[in-house]
Image (tube, grey):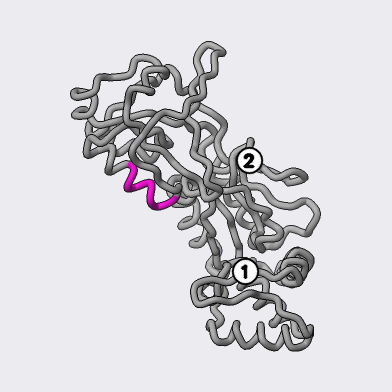
Amino acid sequence: MELDDLSAFVAVASAKGFREAARISGVSASGLSEALRRLETRLNTRLLHRSTRSISLTEAGARLYERIGPSLAEIGAALDSVQALTDEPAGALKLNVPANVARTVLPGILPGFLGAHPHIRVEVTVEDSFVDILASGADAGIRYEERLEQDMIAVPIGPREQRLLTAAAPSYFAARGRPAHPRDLVHHNCMRLRFASGAIATWEFEKDGEVLRFDPPGSLLIQPGSACDLLVEAAVSGLGIVCLFEDWLAPHLRSGALESVLEDWTPPFSGPMLYYSGRRQIPPPLRAFIDFTRSISG
């Protein structure tokens, strides 16, 4: 059975659509569709439920995807290991990262890395939910310590400390008052994040060993990602209070468009970690990326 057809199936299943799979893989949507048709014909079973708007895996498709996703990743790693015999690593490096890392960490790393390794192509998938990086086809992921998968090797990447800040526009505080304690947030309009799972991010505060968690009321919910810009702009306009990474808010804090509150209740936490499986050989592009991030972190 042709590996290209199996790869096409994994690409479409991972991307949850032919158009996105075509964009990521560089193979046309029609080419992917033909590969899927050949594979289903050989197996004499349907692997995907197709509609005009979406696709989903059949039971047989889900079972096949679960088994061959890691296997194809191993084949890719074996091919990459051959390229490691050359002086310059080459090939694709696939990273799965949360939105904050894509916005505030990778811009300080990728330009220098790609400049130093012109034969490597980096593919970044932005997801804030928990992800099985092997099944997703990624070489590595970046998450915070509490979200790391088990049995993974983790190395620091980016800033070693970060923190969340709670902030709003001066006009909002002039109209509604400034919260002096986290419990005061129940009387404010708190604009929040809703993850793809449907869960709404809880606001957490800590001071002198006391930890408080709140689900304050608010008129705006945003799914993490580029839409966080809308959350920030809504705060700048005076709509309400946001709680986001300091890096996202920093330009507006410096300009005075936003003012932070409750800073003594928002201590820093450990920065992100690059993690990858210890059960497979490290592909040369990933090894080069690990070495580069270590070199720039001193």
Crowd band around label 1 with a 10 angstrom C-alpha radius: few (<14), some (14–19), many (20+): some
Residue 86 sits in quarter: bottom right
Label 1 element class? strand
Q: Is residue 71 magenta?
A: no
Give yes or no for contact between labels 1 and 2 (Cβ–Cβ under 8 Å): no
Give the x, y percent position of residue 282. 73, 58
Q: Which numbered tag is attached to residue 56?
A: 1
Label annotation for residue 147: 2
| 76 to the left or right of 118 | right
The residue at the far top in this view is 208
Determine which quarter of the picture holds residue 181: top left
Q: Is residue 200 left or right of residue 179?
A: right
Describe residue 150's horizontal placement relative to residue 136 as left or right: right
Q: 253 or 135, which is in the foreground?
A: 135
Q: In front: 178, or 176?
A: 176
Which range of residues does the magenta coloring cover?
225-231
Is 157 situated above or below 284? above
**Residue type beneath disc 1:** Ser
Q: Secondary structure at mark 2?
A: helix
Q: Residue at x 22, y 39 (%)?
A: 237
> The C terminus lies in which quarter of the figure?
top right
Using the numbered discs, state the Cα–Cα distance from disc 1 to disc 2 in whole angstroms.
Answer: 26 Å
Image coordinates of residue 93 in percent, x first then y, are 61, 63
Residue 230 falls within the magenta-colored stretch: yes
Which residue is pictured at 58% across the width and 86% down the height? Answer: 31
